[in-house]
C-alpha cells in the first residue's frame, strides 16, 4: 500500500510492482489507473475484437430475422440479434476508453475493421445458408460464447467485467432461444431434421476453432499466457473447449443428431475429450480476413457506414441553439 | 460545443422510486437529446425505469488514482460511528446499580 | 356486407401496416448510421411487430384463421397496408448491395407514426371493445417511437445543407403517397357509421395539422394535399415491392409443407 504522496513519486518499475500487487490481491483496474503498456494493448486487442465480433455477428443471422417462420420467432430472433449489437456497443465503449490515451476512437475502430487490421471471431466469417444455421448459431455459438464470457467475468479489468456481467445476463435468454429453435427442428419433419443435421455438420469445425488453438504452436503466436498472468482471463483455450464438449456433446446426442467426428470420445484415464483437431491453417486464414463470407460482410458494413457518413457529419454540426440553414 | 459526432455520455438510472440512481454505462452520441433517446433503448430494453439521466462526460470531475489513495482515512474515527458507542448498555447498568444502591 | 366483414377490413389495415412497416425496419439491421441507433431502432421494429401480432390475434379470435397464417400465407392482393409502407428502403436488397436512404426512413417513420398516434387515439373510443383495449395497450409504446423519430427529424432538418436537401427530398417523396396512409379505403364510411373509428377526413386532417406544425417549426411548408400516386393499398392495390417483401417474410414458412411447427 502506498500513500498519495508516495504514489506521486513512484518510478515506472515501482508502479509496475504496485500494479502487479493489485492484480495479485484480486483488485480491479479502472480505465484511468496506471497500467503497463502491454496490459493496455492486450486489453484493447482482446476487447476490440470481442466487441467488433458481436457487431459482425449480426450479419450471419441478419438474413434470418425477417425470414423467421412465425411471428413469435421473428420477434425472438430480432431481440436476440439486437442484444448482440448491444453487447458490441458495451464492449466497444470499454475498448474505446482504453484507446483514448492513444488518440483513437470509434472511427479508428471502424476503419481498422474495414482494412482487416481488426480481426473478428472465426465463426462470423462463415455462411449461414439455412434457418437451421440460425438455430445452431443461437444454440451452440452462443453456448460457446457464454462459456468464454463467464470465464472472463472475473477479469482484472473492472469496466470489462461490468460489461460482461450485463452481457451474461442477456446471454441466458439467447441460450434458451437457441435451445427452443433446435428442439423444434429436431422434433419436426424429415426435412427439418435433415436441415438441422447439415447445419451442425457445417458448424462443428468452426465451433471447435472458436476457442482458439491449444497453444502458440498451432498458429505461431498467442496472447493467452500474458492474459493469464495479468488475470485478464483465467482459463486456457483448451480448458474452455473441453468444458464445451462436456456440456454439449450429450445434449447434441439427445437431439438425435450425429457429431461429424468419428474419433470423438471421452478418455476416462486422461479425463478429457479426444477429438479431431480442426484445421488450424484454415483458422489462421479465416481470422486474417480470408473466410468464405469475410469480404461480403465487410462490404455490407463498410458500404452502409460510408453511405450514412452524411448523417454523422450533419449531427456533429447540429446545435439546437443555432439554426445552420433555413 | 465541439463539432464531433462521437461524444461520450454517461448514463444513470433509477429502477424504482425507493432506489438510488445507479451508473449504467456510457454511450457515444452527437448531443444530449440524441444521447437521451439512445440511452433509453440501449440500456432499458428489459428492465423498468423510473428515472433516467444522461451527462456529457466532459462535465464530470472524476477521481484520479492518486486521489483514490489520498482520500483514504486512518481507522481512528469510531467516535463518528455507532460502533464507537458499544459500551452504552454497560453504562446504563452502571447507572442503574448506582441509583439502586443509593435508594 | 356484414358488420363482421367490415370490421375485419379495418383490422387488416392496422395489422398489415404494422407488419410491413416492421419488416422495412428489420432490413436496416446492421446498416444504420450509428451502432447505438441500431439497438434503439431495433426495439421500435420489435414493438411494431408486436403490434402487428396483437392485431392479427384479434383477427384470429374473429375466426379469420391462425395469426401466423394470416401474416405469412395471404396473397399480396389481400394485404391492406398503405403502399408507402411497403416501399423499399432503397435500391438493392437487405443482404446484397443495399443503398438505403436514411432521410427517407426518418421521414417515412415519423409521418407514419404521427398518423398512427392519431389513429390510436381514435381507436381507443372504438365501439368494438377488443380494438379499443388493444389501441390503449399499443399507445404506451407509441410515445417513445414518436419521440425517437421526431428527434432525428428535427436535428437533421436543422443541420447541414446536405442533410436539409436530402430531408426535403424525402418529405416530397413521402408526400406523394402519404394519402394512401390516411386513406381508410373503400369501406371508410361504413367504419365511421359503425363507430369503429372516426371518419377518414377528420383523422386525416388531424394528422396533417400535426405534421404541418412539426414541419413549420423547422421552417418547412407542407404544400397541398398528400397524394396517392402508386394506388390505394387499402383496396388491395400494391406494388412489386410488397410481393418481394412477402416472399422474403414467408420463405421459411413455405419451405416445408410437412412441418407442423417451427
Image (spheres, grey):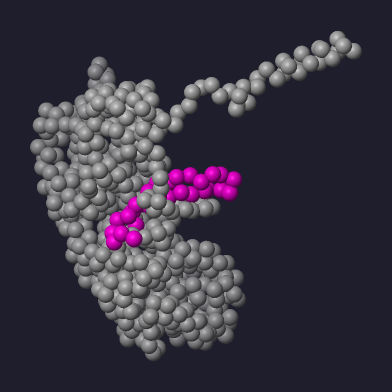
Depth order, front residue of A67/C21: C21
Left or right: A125 as drawn, with respect to C101: left
Q: List x then y, in percent, for residue A29.
A: 34, 33
Left or right: C6 as drawn, with respect to A237: right
In the depicted structure, whether residue A175 falls above or below residue C86: above
Depth order, front residue of A326/A133: A326
In the depicted structure, whether residue B94 falls above or below residue A115: above
Depth order, front residue of C141/B91: B91
Total tally of numbered discs in the picture: 0
The residue sitting at 13% across, 32% down in the picture is: A221
In the depicted structure, whether residue A118 falls above or below residue C139: above
In the depicted structure, whether residue B34 falls above or below residue A143: below
Indicate the quadrant where residue A102 lies: top left
The residue sitting at 59% across, 45% down in the picture is: B18
Residue B7 is a magenta residue: yes
Left or right: C161 as drawn, with respect to C206: left
Left or right: A292 as drawn, with respect to A245: left
Q: Which residues are magenta?
A: B1-29
Indicate the quadrant where residue B40 lies: bottom left
Residue A54 is a magenta residue: no
The residue sitting at 37% across, 60% down in the picture is: B31
Q: List x then y, in percent, for residue A156.
A: 33, 31
The residue sitting at 47% across, 53% down in the picture is: B53
Q: Kindly give the residue lying farthest to the bottom in the view shown.
A: C224
- Residue C25 in view: yes
Q: List x then y, in percent, for residue C49.
A: 41, 63
Depth order, front residue of C38/B10: B10
Q: List x then y, in percent, for residue A232.
A: 29, 31
Q: Kindly give the residue lying farthest to the right in the view shown.
A: B103
- Residue C27 in view: no
Amino acid at each position: 500500500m502506498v500513500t498519495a504522496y508516495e504514489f506521486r513519486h513512484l518510478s515506472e518499475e515501482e508502479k509496475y510492482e504496485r500494479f502487479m500487487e493489485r492484480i495479485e490481491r484480486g483488485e480491479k483496474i479502472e480505465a484511468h489507473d496506471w497500467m503497463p503498456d502491454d496490459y493496455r494493448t492486450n486489453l484493447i486487442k482482446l476487447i476490440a475484437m470481442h466487441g467488433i465480433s458481436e457487431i459482425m455477428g449480426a450479419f450471419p443471422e441478419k438474413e434470418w430475422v425477417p425470414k423467421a417462420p412465425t411471428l413469435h420467432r421473428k420477434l425472438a430472433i430480432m431481440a436476440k440479434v439486437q442484444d448482440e449489437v448491444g453487447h458490441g456497443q458495451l464492449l466497444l465503449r470499454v475498448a474505446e476508453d482504453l484507446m483514448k490515451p492513444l488518440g483513437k476512437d470509434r472511427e479508428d475502430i471502424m476503419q481498422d475493421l474495414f482494412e482487416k487490421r481488426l480481426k473478428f471471431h472465426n465463426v462470423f466469417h462463415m455462411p449461414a445458408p439455412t434457418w437451421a444455421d440460425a438455430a445452431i448459431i443461437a444454440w451452440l455459438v452462443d453456448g460457446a460464447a457464454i462459456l468464454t464470457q463467464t470465464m472472463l467475468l472475473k477479469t482484472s479489468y473492472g469496466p470489462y467485467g461490468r460489461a460482461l456481467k450485463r452481457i451474461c445476463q442477456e446471454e441466458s435468454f439467447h441460450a434458451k432461444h437457441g435451445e427452443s429453435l433446435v428442439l423444434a427442428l429436431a422434433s419436426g419433419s424429415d426435412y427439418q431434421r435433415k436441415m438441422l443435421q447439415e447445419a451442425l455438420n457445417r458448424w462443428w469445425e468452426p465451433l471447435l476453432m472458436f476457442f482458439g488453438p491449444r497453444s502458440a504452436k498451432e498458429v505461431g503466436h498467442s496472447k493467452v499466457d500474458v492474459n493469464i498472468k495479468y488475470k485478464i482471463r483465467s482459463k486456457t483455450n483448451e480448458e474452455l473447449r473441453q468444458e464445451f464438449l462436456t456440456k454439449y456433446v450429450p445434449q447434441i446426442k439427445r437431439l438425435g443428431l450425429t457429431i461429424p467426428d468419428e474419433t470423438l470420445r471421452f478418455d476416462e484415464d486422461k479425463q478429457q475429450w479426444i477429438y479431431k483437431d480442426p484445421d488450424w491453417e484454415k483458422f489462421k486464414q479465416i481470422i486474417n480476413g480470408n473466410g468464405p463470407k469475410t469480404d461480403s460482410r465487410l462490404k455490407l458494413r463498410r458500404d452502409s457506414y460510408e453511405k450514412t457518413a452524411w448523417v454523422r457529419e450533419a449531427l456533429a454540426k447540429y446545435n439546437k441553439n443555432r439554426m445552420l440553414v433555413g | 460545443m465541439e463539432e464531433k459526432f462521437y461524444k461520450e455520455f454517461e448514463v444513470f438510472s433509477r429502477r424504482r422510486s425507493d432506489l438510488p440512481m445507479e451508473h449504467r454505462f456510457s454511450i457515444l452520441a452527437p448531443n444530449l437529446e440524441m444521447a437521451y433517446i439512445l440511452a433509453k433503448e440501449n440500456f432499458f430494453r428489459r428492465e423498468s425505469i423510473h428515472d433516467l439521466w444522461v451527462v456529457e462526460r466532459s462535465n464530470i470531475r472524476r477521481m484520479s488514482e492518486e486521489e483514490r489513495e489520498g482520500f483514504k482515512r486512518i481507522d481512528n474515527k469510531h467516535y463518528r460511528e455507532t460502533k464507537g458507542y458499544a459500551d452504552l448498555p454497560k453504562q446504563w447498568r452502571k447507572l442503574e446499580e448506582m441509583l439502586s444502591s443509593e435508594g | 356486407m356484414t358488420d363482421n366483414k367490415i370490421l375485419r377490413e379495418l383490422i387488416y389495415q392496422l395489422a398489415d401496416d404494422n407488419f410491413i412497416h416492421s419488416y422495412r425496419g428489420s432490413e436496416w439491421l446492421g446498416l444504420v448510421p450509428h451502432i447505438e441507433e441500431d439497438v434503439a431502432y431495433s426495439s421500435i421494429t420489435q414493438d411494431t411487430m408486436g403490434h402487428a401480432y396483437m392485431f392479427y390475434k384479434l383477427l384470429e379470435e374473429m375466426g379469420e384463421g391462425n395469426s401466423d397464417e394470416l401474416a405469412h400465407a395471404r396473397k399480396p392482393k389481400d394485404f391492406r397496408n398503405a403502399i408507402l409502407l411497403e416501399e423499399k428502403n432503397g435500391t438493392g436488397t437487405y443482404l446484397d448491395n443495399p443503398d438505403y436512404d436514411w432521410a427517407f426512413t426518418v421521414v417515412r417513420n415519423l409521418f407514419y407514426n404521427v398518423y398512427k398516434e392519431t389513429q390510436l387515439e381514435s381507436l381507443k373510443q372504438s365501439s368494438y371493445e377488443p380494438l379499443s383495449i388493444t389501441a390503449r395497450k399499443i399507445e404506451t409504446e407509441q410515445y417513445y417511437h414518436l419521440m425517437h423519430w421526431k428527434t432525428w427529424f428535427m436535428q437533421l432538418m436543422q443541420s447541414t445543407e446536405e442533410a436539409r436537401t436530402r430531408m426535403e427530398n424525402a418529405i416530397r417523396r413521402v408526400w406523394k403517397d402519404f394519402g394512401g396512409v390516411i386513406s381508410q379505403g373503400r369501406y371508410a364510411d361504413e367504419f365511421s357509421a359503425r363507430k369503429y373509428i372516426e371518419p377518414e377526413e377528420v383523422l386525416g386532417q388531424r394528422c396533417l395539422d400535426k405534421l404541418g406544425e412539426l414541419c413549420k417549426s423547422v421552417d418547412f411548408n407542407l404544400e397541398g394535399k398528400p397524394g396517392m400516386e402508386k394506388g390505394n393499398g387499402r383496396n388491395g392495390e400494391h406494388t412489386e415491392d410488397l410481393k418481394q417483401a412477402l416472399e422474403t417474410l414467408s420463405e421459411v414458412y413455405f419451405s416445408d409443407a410437412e412441418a407442423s411447427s417451427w
